[in-house]
Amino acid sequence: MRSVIQRVKVARVIVEGRRVGEIGPGLVVLLGVGREDNEKDIAYLVEKIINLRIFDDKDGRMNLSLPEVGGEILVVSQFTLYGDCRKGRRPSFDEAASIGRALELYNKFIESLREKGLKVETGEFQARMLVEIHNDGPVTFVLDSKKQF
């Protein structure tokens, strides 16, 4: 499972002219699901994301986690995180999960975040979305549950 997380002041998702998700200060999580992913990958990423100390303390140092600042999360599915661009000009998505499996794990990921007591908003799975992100910092991290980077 791969994610790009961005610390934001505000973020929203628009689908066909309607707002489907919106948060204030917190994190946007762009989430890609791979063919080999399972519940262990979800558990790893959920714990890593909510406990990363990437919010400023009173001294302006990144020293606080999402729950410590009362932040929110916007989760957006993004299968293109599994696009392999190493060969040729057209990305290969062979390592991405099938649509059914990706949806199942995407929903379990969201459910796991909500079970932690966090406010979680989402995009719309498999929709063409307009994602508006006001990156704070900018602060952006890439996480991989298989720890490939």
Image: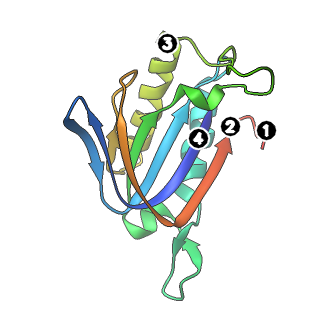
Q: Between marks 2 and 3, how big is the CA–CA gap?
A: 19 Å
In the picture of the structure, the residue carrying the numbered disc 1 is: 148
In the picture of the structure, the residue carrying the numbered disc 3 is: 99
Left or right, 107 with respect to 44, comes to left
Q: Position of residue 52 (x, y in %)?
A: 59, 60
- Residue count near mark 2 (Cα–Cα under 10 Å), binned few <14, some 14–19, many ≥20: some
Mark sitting earlier along the chain (3/4): 4
The answer to whether residue 83 is above or below residue 30 is above
Quarter of the image for the N terminus: give it.
top right
Q: Is the residue 12 above or below the residue 83 in the image?
A: below
Q: Quadrant of residue 21?
A: top left
Q: Nearer the viewer, residue 35 or 87?
A: 87
Q: Amino acid at mark 3?
A: Ile
Which quadrant of the figure contains the C terminus?
top right
Where does residue 101 sit, x and y in percent of width and height? Answer: 52, 14
Q: Please give the residue where the numbered disc 4 appears in the rendered image.
A: 3
Looking at the rendered image, the disc whose residue lies closer to the viewer, 2 or 3, is 3
The mark nearer the N terminus, 2 or 3, is 3
Viewer-closest of 117 and 16: 16
Q: Secondary structure at mark 3?
A: helix
Spatial separation of the CA atoms under disc 1 and disc 2: 8 Å
> Tag 1's secondary structure?
loop
For mark 2, what is the residue? Answer: 145
